Image (cartoon, coloured by chain):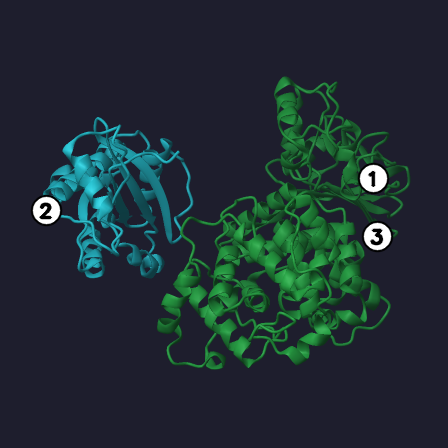
Amino acid sequence: MDAQGYNCFVDRDKMDAAIQDLGPKELSCTELQELKQLARQGYWARSYALRGKVYQRLIRDIPCRTVTPDASVYSDVVGKIVGKHSGSSLPLPEFVDNTQVPSYCLNPRGEGAVRKILLCIANQFPDVSFCPALPAVVALLLHYSTDEAECFEKACRILACNDPSRKLIDQSFLAFESSCMTFGDLVNKYCQAAHKLMVAVSEDVLQVYADWQRWLFGELPLSYFARVFDVFLVEGYKVLYRVALAILKFFHKVRAGQPLESDNVKQDIRAFVKDIAKTVSPEKLLEKAFAIRLFSRKEIQLLQMANEKALKRRGITVKQKSVSLSKRQFVHLAVHAENFHSEIVSVKEMRDIWSWVPERFALCQPLLLFSSLQHGYSLTRFYFQCEGHEPTVLLIKTTQKEVCGAYLSTDWSERNKFGGKLGFFGTGECFVFRLQPEVQRYEWVVIKHPELTRPVSSETTATPALLCHSASSGASDRLSPFLAARHFNLPSKTESLFMAGGSDCLIIGGGGGQALYVDGDLNRGRTGHCDTFNNQPLCSENFLIAAVEAWGFQDPDIQ
Amino acid sequence: MEAIWLYQFRLIVIGDSTVGKSCLIRRFTEGRFAQVSDPTVGVDFFSRLVEIEPGKRIKLQIWDTAGQERFRSITRAYYRNSVGGLLLFDITNRRSFQNVHEWLEETKVHVQPYQIVFVLVGHKCDLDTQRQVTRHEAEKLAAAYGMKYIETSARDAINVEKAFTDLTRDIYELVKRGDITIQEGWEGVKSGFVPNVVHSSEEVVKSERRCLC
């Protein structure tokens, strides 16, 4: 170590520009809230030595499996595993999936050390099957470790974290893939403009989003990545989504008006992240990341679980060469032009709709369930055709050639649970849209205004069971209002009225009006503003229906 | 306060994947049964005190191992420092019974120069209707290797206490007879701390002498 606190693995000439040591050398606080503040402010970025101490502390405090390899294990196994190879000639373990080790201002000795450590981790963690983020993590940790063994121990602790609520890094292909899908879902909800651009310029948008971890763990310059890692160690996985969303927002802002540099948006984003210093400072990047009013951890976790389930059902649990990626079909690929026919929308419009649905359903093919042309103008028949399918897409064409519709999360048969009365059901994944004359989508109002789900005052008319639940649990561990609205006791009922169906009418969106109202003969309809979707009328306020269709989601493998 | 015990025995639980090793240990150490549990990663660790005679307590350190093949290189490092072991198979899974021999060979190679006192455990005996291994053949196999045989169920809490305490008693007898001795650099058996006021039996005196040496 020298005056700056750099260890023997660091190329000092490269470092001086990257991090200046100005700050205090001691970590004085221990409170989580305070740590969170310091991490977000970049307090530890000011001193190399301080950040080293902070990492030591934070990583030591990670709850780990009882038997977690430590520094002495490294000393035991490294000789056996590495043999007489020199560090730089060592192969990387398979789980990094062709990821390169980022240089992060390490000298050749440091780069060799990273390879040695990765190999020893592979030996000690046979369960880690897919972890492309690990080379970057190890390379960064090496900066703040006195020797290889200490760096190994730190990386092991991050992998062996056994707090189920504290996911740190994805270690299997299934976890990685479902994170990519979850990221896609979040982009779809929180960066609609960027999402639109991605859909327009890429063949398979999920392929672009599958890169999201690479932006952070690899392309981001060291000083940025270290800042992200600071908050990541304190706050966990969710900040990774935040930062990646912020990167995409900046990319969109900078590149929106310009023609793309290459015909490959994936490469463009990578290049953009590499040179992010030209666009924003680390401060601005984090500021943007934390300004996004993201779902709660719990909701993200539920979304991730739903995605994982969808992948498992499809049998995508391990990366198979060439199969998994080409088999995964999204947007342009999912809606096949040749066997698609609709009275209401074109293939292109259907692809637009498909780009809005949650990732786990975007993997499926559209399946026509009901068509007024084929099944007649009867609401009863409509329900009959739709029952057993979840989710569905409703499409309406008016006699004025306007087209609008809704994505409906829940099986129409749920309408029977209200004992003959008209009752609302569905989840926060529902949305309504207009396609003609111009495209506009309206999401559940709570996505933009999470404050609307703040805890309920006690005088609600909830059942005793629900009251117990809301009383006994804090805001953070409530059931997800997003995926499970039907179990959720929302403060104002008027903001979670998604769908309702009776024998003489069908309603989408309620509260102060209805986004869509259709009569029992599928003849007349109305549209207007409603609180649930905070939407404008989707077409002429009173309309005559020309055609109605309902589409379901078909697993491509079952065809 | 640290509980008071005469000896500490380190036990290891091995057997094929999904035979119920972790569930058996959890039933014994925590008294509960989880319907679903994740596969064990590498090695996990539990402990509990057992009273083999009134006032005579042994602390058990129980090492749970992953049954999956890919963890073998990690788990085998734990054989050497164990004095006793429960070798589990699932009575509804013939394959896991056929693998008992492999497990014994595997440990034999890696435990040198020490020895492990094994008990053969036929687990999931609550699922008697799906049984694929008869009690008779399991007993025969156990006898051939000089082991005891016991059938347990973590779900219905059958014989769980007995499996661990019988093994503990057997090891205790061997220690008392001097067939197993405490050795420097070996974690299998360690002597504990016993204050004079609690015990006055000869074993206590013995163990105190050990502490001093």
Which image quarter is the N terminus of chain A in? bottom right
Query: Which residue is rendered at x = 36% and y = 31% of the image?
Result: B31
Q: What label does residue A155 carry, if any?
A: none
**Residue placed most toward the observer, A28 or A432:** A28
Res. A211 visible in picture: no
Q: Specify few, some or many for label 2: CA neighbours under 10 Å numbering under 14, 14-19, or 20 or more.
A: few
Q: Quadrant of residue B72?
A: bottom left
**Residue placed most toward the observer, A340 or A451:** A451
The answer for how far apart the CA atoms under marks 1 and 3 are is 19 Å
Name the spot of residue B53 as percent of width and height, x first: 19, 29
Q: Amino acid at mark 2?
A: Gly
Q: Colour of chain A?
A: green
Chain drawn cyan in the picture: B
Q: Amino acid at mark 3?
A: Val
Q: Which residue is mark 1?
A: A545
Q: Which residue is mark 2?
A: B146
Name the spot of residue A139 as percent of width and height, x first: 57, 69
Q: Secondary structure at mark 3?
A: loop
Q: Secondary structure at mark 1?
A: strand
> Which of the two marks, 2 or 1, is nearer to us in this view?
2
| Marks 1 and 3, the one that precedes in the sequence | 3
Protein chain holding label 3: A
